[in-house]
Image (tube, rainbow, N blue to C red):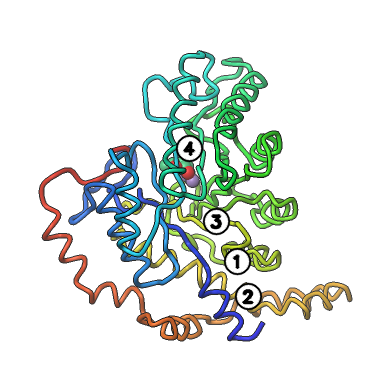
Amino acid sequence: MNKNDVKEILRKQWIETPSWAYGNSGTRFKVFAQKGVARNPFEKMEDAAQVHRYTGVAPSVAVHIPWDKVDDYSALAKHARDLGIKIGAINPNVFQEDDYRLGSVCNPDPRVRRKATDHLLECVDIAHETDSFAISLWFADGTNYPGQDNIRARQDRLHEALQETYDAMNPGLQMLLEYKLYEPSFYTMDVPDWGTSLLQCLALGDQAKVLVDTGHHALATNIEFLVASLLRTKRLGGFHFNSRFYGDDDLMVGAADPFQLFRIMFEIVDAEAVTPEAGVAFMLDQCHNIEPKIQAEIRSVMNVQEATAKALLVDRDELKKLQLAGDVLGAYELFSDAYATDVRPLLAEMRTEMGLDPDPIGAYQRSGYQKKIEEERVGGTAAGWGA
Ligand code: RM4
Ligand code: MN
Ligand code: MN
């Protein structure tokens, strides 16, 4: 693909940032407070708007309920619109209450399942009210010990709750079902992998799709392979991008393995699914424990753009010829040459053409926004993971 075509596609890319990236976070050992951190969902929107301002491709923010609970969601949506962005995926939280010790929608107790399902329904209402494109579901449900509960019965309970939620959704809304191999449940997770997610989605209908969180796999998993399979069956709902070196740790996307990110993006390019019309959502799911948060989100958006640009540079016609001719090394060389290309000048040029600063991080640093929030956001409680 030539340079101008690459830029045209990249300009249309849409990368969503998560509201929880703008709050304080840490591990179970320590949460480190940073100065100027947003104290409420409105301030988180302001920070997210900065990321969009300097990258031009991050026009939406995912919210997590109840972390981002407000009295008036229309007011929050309006605040976002006034800042030039919008509310993205609505993420219900059914993992932080004592009631959920044995699970939420898969809990053996029907009372707890009712409570969890009601929260999912509340999130469907919020999605309708804020004109969001999706509810994005992740369940911490599972078991810690063999024999603890009936594996099949838990799948049935999961289906029942998802069906009730699905039935409440307007036709334009999507349900994204995320999976995670392990943690917080250590023996079985009820949605541990893309196969389980896909089976549950298939039982619901076209509006239900699989969400791939890049940090939620066994270490040797070939993520681009499963992405290709999901694209083929039109059931790839989107991504939660992040990096992990060992287990799920929500580091910046592209930090651990930029080549893997390139390979994933190549599958997206090959299925012509980079731009929003294709219906694949590119969302970041990250927490910035020790690094400055807004800059880390800008950096992450840039990392996704770089991987996408390199993937777009693969000459697919030529690659196909080499593949059909059985030219193993030729195909590999063409593929790796695209990866080895320095796409930063191309992206800088594109930003200038979009009326942006070619250097998003530098522009943010020079803007004085960080100083301003550090001075203004005093008093109150900084938002945090779980607060
Ligand atoms: C989970 C999962 C979800 C996210 C929570 C905070 O590991 O990735 O997407 O909402 O963390
Ligand atoms: Mn996630
Ligand atoms: Mn995660």
Is 332 left or right of 22, judged from the image as shown?
right
Asked whether 150 or 368 is in front, the reply is 368
Does dot 4 land on a helix, a strand or a loop? Answer: helix
Question: In the drawing, what numbered circle is on residue 312?
Answer: 2
Determine which residue is flagged by label 1. Answer: 274
Q: Nearer the viewer, mark 4 or mark 1?
A: 4
Label 3 or label 2, whichever comes before in sequence order: 3
**Residue at (31% x, 46% y) in the render:** 25
Dot 4 crowding, Cα within 10 Å, few <14, some 14–19, many 20+: many
In the image, residue 312 sits, relative to residue 29, either above or below, namely below
Give the percent coordinates (x, y) of residue 386.
32, 37
**Residue at (63% x, 40% y) in the render:** 193
Q: Mark 1: which amino acid? A: Val
Determine which residue is flagged by label 3. Answer: 281
Label 2 or label 4, whichever comes before in sequence order: 4
Asked whether 244 or 99 is in front, the reply is 99
Give the percent coordinates (x, y) of residue 383.
25, 45
**Residue at (51% x, 75% y) in the render:** 11
Does dot 1 land on a helix, a strand or a loop? Answer: loop
Is 179 left or right of 58, judged from the image as shown?
right
Q: Nearer the viewer, mark 2 or mark 4?
A: 4
Is ligand 2 within 8 Å of the beta carbon of the residue shown at mark 3? no
Q: Are marks 2 and 4 in contact (CB under 8 Å)?
A: no
Label 1 or label 3, whichever comes before in sequence order: 1
Quadrant of image for the C terminus: top left
Determine which residue is flagged by label 4. Answer: 124
Question: In the drawing, what numbered circle is on residue 205?
Answer: none
Q: Are marks 2 and 1 in contact (CB under 8 Å)?
A: yes
Is 322 left or right of 258, judged from the image as shown?
right
